[in-house]
Amino acid sequence: MADTFERRADPMVLWPQARSVVMLAMNYGPAVDPLEALRRRSCAAISVYARHRDYHDVIKGRLKTLAAWLVAAARPEKAEVKVFVDTAPVMEKPLAAAAGLGWQGKHTNLVSRDFGSWLFLGAIFTDLTLAPDAAESDHCGACRACLDVCPTRAFTAPYRLDARRCVSYLTIEHKGTIARELRPAIGARIYGCDDCLAVCPWNKFAREGREAKLAQREDLANPSLAELAALDEPSFRRRFAGGPIKRIGHARFLRNVMIAIGNSRDPALIGAARAQLAAPSPLVRAMAVWALARLCPTDEFSALTREYAETEPDTDVAREWRAPVAAPPER
């Protein structure tokens, strides 16, 4: 399997019949530095792993192939297997480290000598007894590049992540309004964050991923914020069909786009934000208000406040209208 490698670790108690766990890692290294996307102020930054087909489907297919080989190799003994790709409370990263695929870096993600930080992980639990591979040791040394680059300062210490401040959590898993103090640091990141992965020195050994099903879609490399803001729900679903972005839904997607617009320093995007003041979702309207407060001249924002604030039925959105106007980014 190109760009795919596996090792075995002792099982954790998840499936009572399990005696062994086979861990698989797949390289998805990008062709270019993902941090370059952050320098384009009117474009969105999408995490490398979300610029193509949903990796869950691809990895699960590889796991099933390997699992079928294990079952066939076990004959005449009968073998049971179960595969997991973020589908159960499996601690993939500690298991992968125990299996020798790499080590958990100070950013808590797995790092490999051969592939750097760009790895998808999957697990096969089996009732077969397999000899475990040797665990990998930590090779981070005194480096703290991943800790220092984090835009929201989500690392409380080496190997410790406060997920509530992590941009990946905030833009993907978090369902509500994102705290005001964290919004400026999100920048143009509308889905996930690659900063701590991208700066890892071990990426000097990284290779570009070769899995055709995970090839980057060019329309997701540096999409225009204005274009994304104009997507209605049907067009959002069509645009992101088969990929992970679709899973967060249209409202959360537009929430993230509005924050990126507010951070863009581009007054040409005022119209895109203003159009969302009529959005059905209060979450989207609230972030549109914040974006306008960052981009509009004071008198223009004051006029919008007089027009919209008094008739706004949602308390969170109304609070955004009356919040102190944050100083806009430098233009």
Image: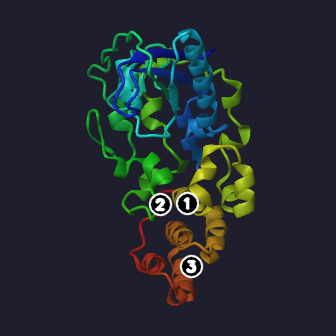
Q: Nearer the viewer, residue 102 or 327?
A: 102
> Mark 2 or mark 1, which has the lower sequence index?
2
Which residue is label 3 attached to?
Answer: 300
Determine which of the numbered discs, if any, sits on residue 325 in the image: none
Asked if the residues shown at circle 3 and circle 2 are in contact, with their CB atoms under 8 angstroms apart, the answer is no
Helix, strand or loop at label 2? It is: loop
Q: Is residue 119 visible?
A: no
Which residue is pictured at 42% across the width and 52% down the height?
185
Q: Depth-wise, is mark 3 or mark 2 nearer the camera?
A: 2
Type of the residue with mark 3: Glu
User: Residue 86 placed where, x, y %?
Assistant: 49, 38
Who's the residue at 44% across and 81% down the image? 315
In the rendered image, which residue does mark 2 sit on?
175
Relative to 53, residue 283 above or below: below
Q: Dot 3: what SS? A: helix
Q: Are marks 2 and 1 in contact (CB under 8 Å)?
A: yes
